[in-house]
Image: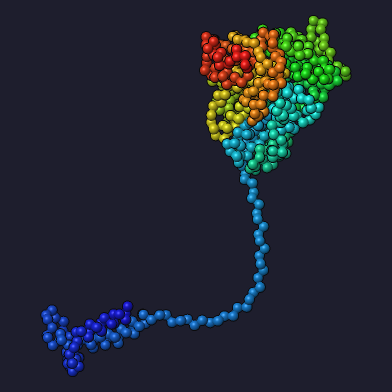
């Protein structure tokens, strides 16, 4: 840029200064003698025509070196060569990868290893796959279903059924009483590691919970170890009732509720044993019929004893109770109705039951099946509200007893929108209330509105399903029809995809139906199949489906809609009761 400036100045000076050299010298001499005068007027003509060359030369002499210095590139630095001796270095070994530590996460603790807890655990994992879930049980078995213990397992042809617990349902599908193999869980032995995240559901067996602290969010195990929970579910079920007159314990008098109870009775029910079943309700009647089936091979002598007028007297209308008792007797059970046990005596060989009126019954073993008492001691000690009338833990509509404390299954007292406060001891309720509680534990916050059902089978030929309040103290309206070979639990399991007796996901193959199609067990029966509507203040509050299958949802809809007795005739078409093809 400086060089261009000089060139421009030189060009301008050449154009403006053309006079002779003498003239220029003369002007320079004059300027040296007389100082320059600054005026606002025009310069004399001689001055304007003088050459500017001396100014250019002077500027070049003065500013040239400066411009040269500014425009010159910087001098090159002298580079010194430094000799560096090579240094031997060690090749670093690859670093050992650090194992990822499991994430610390307070667990969802499910107290009780039954159906309700299993259903809750499945629901939590579905909604939150990375959730830390622990099921705590006081038995040595993974969660299992109880209905087969008094039903299908006794009809198995497998001599090792007591060990493997595998049975075939009425449809012929092979199933296991245990929901899933213990290898599918992560087994833990105490509270250590309870807060580490796991992809599997954790299972802690043979460790009863002795204390629940709802303020500190802790549960204490029998060994004294403590688990800090995120949220907790109480699903402790119930304890089987013993006979009030029984004093002390005897190996010859047992209750029936667990796998161990089944295994023990399975070993006893052999070689012509004399067995008394005490209780005429669901469990007692199922067990009596199941043992009668075993009697065909083992020559057992089975007696059923209860104080009511007949089987299921607290549930069925009187006429249906008497009919059912007649059927149970035909299956080979010695049914002793209206028999209250006055006393029990045991010795090394037998048990003697005093039935009053100078009547005694001597047997080898007594099975007591008179209901359960909900396990609420843990909840009571924790300060939770107990429904003393129904003996259950009181919960709100979301099945929550306190903040972060939920309850489900047999031991929960909940509000039914249609029927009021209730406590239910059936499998379907355990499944649905457990699942609902699990979903709410992970934030669903939905009210429990499910109208649960129950079912009971007296062998493969007699079965019933029911919804709502089914109580013999209520008024009833009944409708009956002739039954066909298809109107049995076995046939229903083979034809109804949604039957509670069918294996999950099983196809509706008709093998079971074919097995009984050639024989109609109700050919001459008055009460082959029918509907019993239970009413309160003319409103339908319960519905019993006797040998009518696959219509549970229709029954639920009727209860939920609040239909009255005047509308029963119009409701019958929902059930195809007089359709001979079904």
Residue 512: image quadrant is top right
In this figure, what is the number of numbered marks? 0
Q: Nearer the viewer, residue 115 or 251?
A: 115
Q: Quadrant of the N terminus?
A: bottom left
* Image point (73%, 9%), residue name: 326
Q: Percent from the top left, x then y, of residue 434?
A: 62, 29
Residue at image location 76% in from the left, 22% down from the top: 155
Quadrant of image for the C terminus:
top right
Identify the residue at image location x=75%, y=17%. Answer: 289
| Horizontal side of residue 274 vs 36, given as left or right | right
Q: Outermost residue, front direction?
A: 518
Residue occupying the point 12% across, 86% down:
45
Determine whether 537 is above or below 231 in the image: above
Q: Is residue 215 left or right of residue 21?
A: right
- Percent from the top left, x then y, of residue 47? 15, 86
Q: Is residue 218 above or below residue 393?
A: below
Residue 318 coordinates in the image, percent (x, y): 66, 8
Instruction: State whether residue 128 appears in this view.
Output: yes
Left or right of 261: which side holds 575?
left
**Which x, y percent locates residue 114?**
68, 29
Does residue 217 appear anywhere in the picture?
no
- The picture quadrant where one finds residue 546 is top right
């Amino acid at each position: 840029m400086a060089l261009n400036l000089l060139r421009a100045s030189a060009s301008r000076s050449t154009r403006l200064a053309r006079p002779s050299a003498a003239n220029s010298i003369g002007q320079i001499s004059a300027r040296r003698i007389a100082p320059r005068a600054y005026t606002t007027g025009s310069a004399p003509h001689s001055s304007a025509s003088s050459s500017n060359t001396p100014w250019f030369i002077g500027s070049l002499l003065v500013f040239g070196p400066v411009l040269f210095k500014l425009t010159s590139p910087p001098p090159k630095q002298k580079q010194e060569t430094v000799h560096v001796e090579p240094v031997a270095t060690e090749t670093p070994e690859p670093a050992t990868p650090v194992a990822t530590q499991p994430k610390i996460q307070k667990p969802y603790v499910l107290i009780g290893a039954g159906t309700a807890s299993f259903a809750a655990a499945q629901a939590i994992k579905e909604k939150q796959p990375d959730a830390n879930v622990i099921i705590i049980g006081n038995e040595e078995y993974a969660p299992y279903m109880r209905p087969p213990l008094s039903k299908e397992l006794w009809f198995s042809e497998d001599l090792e059924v007591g060990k493997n617990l595998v049975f075939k349902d009425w449809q012929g599908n092979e199933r296991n009483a245990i929901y899933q193999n213990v290898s599918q869980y992560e087994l833990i032995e105490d509270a250590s590691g309870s807060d580490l995240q796991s992809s599997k559901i954790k299972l802690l067996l043979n460790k009863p919970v002795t204390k629940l602290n709802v303020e500190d969010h802790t549960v204490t195990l029998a060994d004294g170890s403590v688990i800090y929970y995120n949220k907790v579910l109480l699903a402790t079920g119930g304890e089987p009732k013993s006979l009030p007159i029984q004093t002390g314990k005897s190996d010859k008098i047992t209750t029936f509720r667990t796998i161990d109870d089944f295994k023990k009775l399975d070993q006893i029910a052999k070689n012509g044993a004399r067995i008394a079943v005490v209780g005429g309700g669901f469990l007692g009647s199922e067990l009596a019929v199941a043992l009668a089936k075993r009697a065909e091979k083992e020559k057992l002598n089975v007696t059923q004893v209860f104080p009511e007028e007949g089987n299921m007297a607290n549930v069925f209308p009187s006429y249906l109770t008497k009919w059912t008792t007649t059927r149970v007797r035909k299956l080979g059970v010695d049914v002793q109705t209206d028999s209250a046990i006055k006393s029990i005596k045991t010795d090394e060989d037998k048990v003697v039951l005093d039935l009053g009126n100078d009547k005694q019954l001597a047997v080898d073993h007594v099975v007591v099946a008179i209901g359960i008492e909900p396990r609420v001691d843990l909840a009571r000690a924790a300060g939770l509200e107990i429904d003393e009338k129904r003996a259950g833990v009181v919960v709100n509509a979301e099945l929550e007893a306190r903040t972060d404390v939920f309850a489900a299954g047999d031991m929960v007292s909940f509000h039914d929108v249609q029927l009021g406060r209730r406590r239910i001891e059936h499998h379907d309720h355990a499944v649905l209330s457990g699942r609902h509680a699990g979903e709410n534990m992970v934030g669903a916050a939905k009210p429990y509105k499910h109208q649960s059902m129950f079912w009971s089978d007296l062998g493969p030929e007699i079965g019933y399903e029911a919804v709502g309040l089914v109580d013999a103290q209520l008024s009833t309206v009944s409708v009956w029809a002739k039954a066909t070979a298809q109107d049995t639990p076995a046939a229903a399991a083979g034809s109804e995809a949604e039957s509670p007796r069918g294996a999950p996901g099983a196809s509706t193959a008709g093998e079971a139906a074919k097995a009984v199609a050639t024989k109609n067990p109700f050919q001459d029966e008055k009460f082959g199949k029918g509907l019993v509507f239970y009413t309160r203040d003319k409103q339908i509050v319960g519905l019993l489906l006797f040998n009518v299958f696959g219509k549970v949802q229709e029954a639920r809809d009727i209860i939920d809609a609040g239909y009255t007795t005047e509308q029963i005739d119009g409701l019958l078409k929902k059930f195809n009761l007089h359709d001979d093809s079904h």
